[in-house]
């Protein structure tokens, strides 16, 4: 797979993680954050200081990895960022979460998003994750405080389902990701596939452990009791249709 214009340079994917810190990583991360990441997630963005603290601040309660795709990524004069993905692994539950993925308009519909998501999920499963999750706007909540047009919400969900993801059929509320940010009630939790298709159900204890740890890390407290109590012992992994 090569995005348009690949003849100008081979596609390169740079991995930025706490276990490695190559020269130029910080500048590349900053360019990605203020560029296509900010354009896609301005309303839901995490401050870059949060990323840097998780990557290089020491003592982070989770493992953050960011992969940036493009051409000439180590050459600031010729660099072209085509996409990127951020994913986290939570040590207590063992679960993984794809937090952000964005593809530049010029590189869309070329397979780059699928590749980045698949490889991130495989990395997390290989590290022992019992589940890898993602979050997308829930088209069932269109008009209920969710500003994105329903058509765009359905397209994103259908694209993820075509890649093997399934909706975790339980009520989900994303915690506040940083000071000054609000909880997001308009998302659904999706389970991502790695190299094999997902089972039709998932153990509720996996989701409960993940949600509990996510809230502890982001908000420093437990999730609302009603949110956790509503998680059954077995959760269906479903494919939503319009």
Image (cartoon, grey):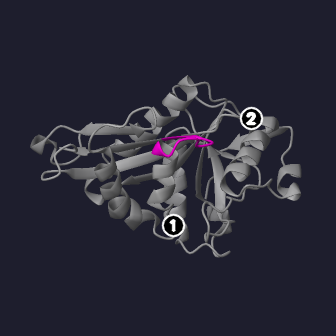
Q: Earlier in the sequence, mark 2 or mark 1?
A: 1
- Above/below status of 23 relative to 108: above
Residue drawn at (71%, 59%) of the image: 173
Residue 142: image location, x then y, percent: 63, 70
Residue drawn at (83%, 47%) of the image: 231
Residue drawn at (30%, 45%) of the image: 110
Q: Nearer the viewer, residue 174 or 154?
A: 174
Residue identified by numbered label 2:
201
Q: In this image, 231 relative to 90: left or right?
A: right
Residue drawn at (16%, 43%) of the image: 6
Q: How many numbered dots are placed on residues in this image?
A: 2
Q: In this image, 180 relative to 34: left or right?
A: right
Residue 69: image location, x then y, percent: 30, 44
The magenta stretch is 56-64
Magenta portion: prevailing SS class: loop
Q: For residue 125: magenta?
A: no
Residue identified by numbered label 1:
151
């Amino acid at each position: 797979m090569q995005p348009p214009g690949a003849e100008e340079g081979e596609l390169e994917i740079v991995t930025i993680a706490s276990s490695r810190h190559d020269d130029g990583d910080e500048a590349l991360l900053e360019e990605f954050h203020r560029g296509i990441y900010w354009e896609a997630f301005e309303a839901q963005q995490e401050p870059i200081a949060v990323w840097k603290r998780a990557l290089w601040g020491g003592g982070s309660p989770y493992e953050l990895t960011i992969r940036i795709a493009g051409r000439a990524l180590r050459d600031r004069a010729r660099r072209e960022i085509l996409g990127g993905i951020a994913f986290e692994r939570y040590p207590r539950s063992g679960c993984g979460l794809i937090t952000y993925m964005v593809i530049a308009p010029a590189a869309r519909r070329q397979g780059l998003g699928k590749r980045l998501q698949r490889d991130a999920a495989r990395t997390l499963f290989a590290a022992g994750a019992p589940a890898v999750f993602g979050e997308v706007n829930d088209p069932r909540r269109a008009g209920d405080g969710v500003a994105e047009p329903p058509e765009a919400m359905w397209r994103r969900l259908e694209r993820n389902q075509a890649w093997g993801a399934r909706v975790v059929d339980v009520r989900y509320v994303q915690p506040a990701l940083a000071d000054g940010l609000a909880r997001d009630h308009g998302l659904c939790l999706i389970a991502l596939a790695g190299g094999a298709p997902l089972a039709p159900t998932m153990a509720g204890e996996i989701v409960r452990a993940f949600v509990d740890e996510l809230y502890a890390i982001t908000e420093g407290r437990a999730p609302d009791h009603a949110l956790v109590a509503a998680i059954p012992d077995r959760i269906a992994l479903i494919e939503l249709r319009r």
